[in-house]
Image: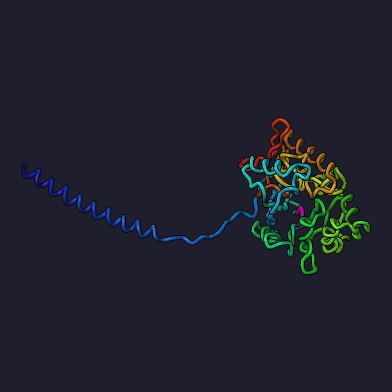
Amino acid sequence: MTGNDASMTRRTALLGAAASGTATAALVSGAALAVAKAPMMGAAAPTFRRIKLGNFEVTTVFDGFGNVPRVHPIFGQNQSAEAVAAQLKANNLPPDKMQIGFTPVVVNTGNEVVLFDTGNGSGRGSTRGKLLTALAAAGFTPDMIDIVVITHMHPDHVSGMIADGKPVFPNARYVTGEVEHNFWTSDATLNSSDKGLQGRVVPIKANVLPLNEQFTFLKGGNDVVTGITAIEAFGHTPGHLVFNIESEGRRLLLWADVCNHYVVSLQKPEWHVVFDMDKDAAIAARKKVLDMAAADRIAATGYHMPFPSIGFVEKIGDMHRWVAATYQFAI
């Protein structure tokens, strides 16, 4: 061994020792890091999404959700429980329970701020009635709303109109379908002995009747404002309305409750849904709206579609499928 060889050996040994020390320190440090734990923060989800639609801005806002502990016969009343469970399982969903969300929509035209439906308000469950919180997160205060459009008068759409005896949206005027309004505010409905109607009438008396003088009424083909046009889609309720929203050639179909679930309603439009008041008319409306959305490739937002509730309808053979929007509105 030469002197240089001895020097190299000593140097190598020293470097090896240093490296070993560094590795040991890293291991100790790594062990310490492995022991440190971040606290669990719980599940989280966005409460609004905003897109550009021509010169309009459209914001979907999450009012919360309701748990459905038993899917059949709420969905697929005219089907077997096994068929409904199989349809859910085929779409990677639990076969015997679900969550249904509630999604009001805000359209800012640049001249008016239009809110479609008002959610559940308070008193309808701890997971619901989050509209005002979601609006605030999206940058809106209640006094900014110029027009409130009620697509139909089921409790989860009208129960957020009044709180503590006062209008929630103090500067707004109200718009709804003429047929819908006439049905729900008629003496026959308000005083009905039908148990199914009685529960639905309670929020009408609490929210709609006190603001009755501030309503104006639409028929199919009428505009709420320029660029927002009503389309009749009766069946879910007697006067249920859908709206075509259009600006600079960009369209969005706001279909409210045409479909109450993206699998066991949208994929199976002929299945009966307990919430539909006229089952046959609701099926016809569902097929008409879904076919229109698919054929014309119109973006859609549905009150009960998976949040953020903006997507497209794809038709494969005789089956429809919901396809969530991604970056179509960002480019």
Scheme of colours in the image: rainbow
Q: Residue furthest top?
A: 317
Measuring 90% from the left and 56% from the top, which residue is drawn there? 189
73 relative to 187, above or below: above
State left or right for residue 24 relative to residue 42: left
- In this picture, which residue range is highlighted in magenta? 114-118
Q: Point out the image quarter for the C terminus.
A: top right
State left or right for residue 17 relative to residue 101: left
Measuring 87% from the left and 60% from the top, which residue is drawn there? 212
Please identify the dominant SS of the magenta region.
strand
Count of marks overlaid on the render:
0
Q: Point out the image quarter for the N terminus.
A: top left
**Visible in this render: residue 248?**
no
Quadrant in the picture for residue 181: bottom right
Q: Position of residue 226 (x, y in %)?
A: 80, 46
Quadrant in the picture for residue 85: top right
Q: Nearer the viewer, residue 17 or 168?
A: 17
Q: Position of residue 308 (x, y in %)?
A: 65, 49
Q: Nearer the viewer, residue 281 or 272?
A: 272
Q: Residue furthest bottom?
A: 164
311 relative to 123, above or below: above
Please check the rendered image and state whether residue 316 is part of the magenta-colored stretch, yes or no.
no
Q: Position of residue 248 (x, y in %)?
A: 72, 40
Measuring 78% from the left and 38% from the top, which residue is drawn there? 287
